[in-house]
Image: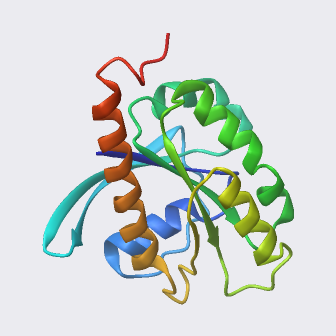
Amino acid sequence: MKVAIVGDGFVGKTTLLRRYCTGLFQESRILTIGVDFQTVVINMGGERVKLTVWDIAGQERFAFVRDSFYRGSRAVALAYDVNDPKSFYDLPRWRDEVWRVVPTALLMVVATKIDLPRAVPREEAIVFARSLPGPYYETSSLAGIGVERFFLGFARRALEGAILAERRGPKADRWP
């Protein structure tokens, strides 16, 4: 199943994905050009769920190509850096961008870099996640905190999205 991680540039999307895939912290200062993707297999109670995780570039100069990368996503994680308030306050823009292309995608919120001092209150992020409605996760790629839990939740959300899409029929999530 296709899923995507979106958010402002340098919030830690690529580092989070690398941490899950390799188990190592590999700080990335190289920006993602357009999109990168990784296939991951997540064990959910003995059942294996295969996700193709699209890591979508957050810089504004790549906005013109993002629409095509969203199509087909069953779940999308809106990522922000707890130390960067702008990245949090941009989440509604990311939500709107995703839903404009894939109105059926199920969303969730993931806070990154929780090992750093917070500039965004946790409660405010939880309220935003509930408004989607969607779950809220906190992660630190550096410390390895919450990474597995987030990807397990991502797989759960993708399964929910796939079930809903199946009920709606094959043309329900196509962009006109």
Q: Is residue 80 above or below residue 61?
A: below
The reply to whether residue 10 is in sight is: no
**3 or 59, which is in the foreground?**
3
**39 or 151, which is in the foreground?**
151
Residue 74 location in percent, x, y?
Answer: 39, 42
Quarter residue 64 falls in: top right
Residue found 42% across the figure and 25% down from its top: 173
Residue found 40% across the figure and 47% down from its top: 3
Residue 78 location in percent, x, y?
Answer: 61, 54
The reply to whether residue 12 is in sight is: yes
Quarter residue 125 falls in: bottom right
Question: Image check: 40 left or right of 24?
Answer: left
Query: Where's the N terminus, which quadrant?
Result: top left
Residue 160 location in percent, x, y?
Answer: 36, 50
Question: Image check: 77 left or right of 36?
Answer: right
**97 or 140, which is in the foreground?**
97
The chosen color scheme is rainbow
Residue 53 location in percent, x, y?
Answer: 38, 51
**163 or 4, which is in the foreground?**
163
Residue found 46% across the figure and 71% down from its top: 150
Q: Is residue 14 above or below residue 138?
A: above
Residue found 36% across the figure and 81% down from its top: 23
Direction top: furthest residue: 176
Counting labels gives: 0
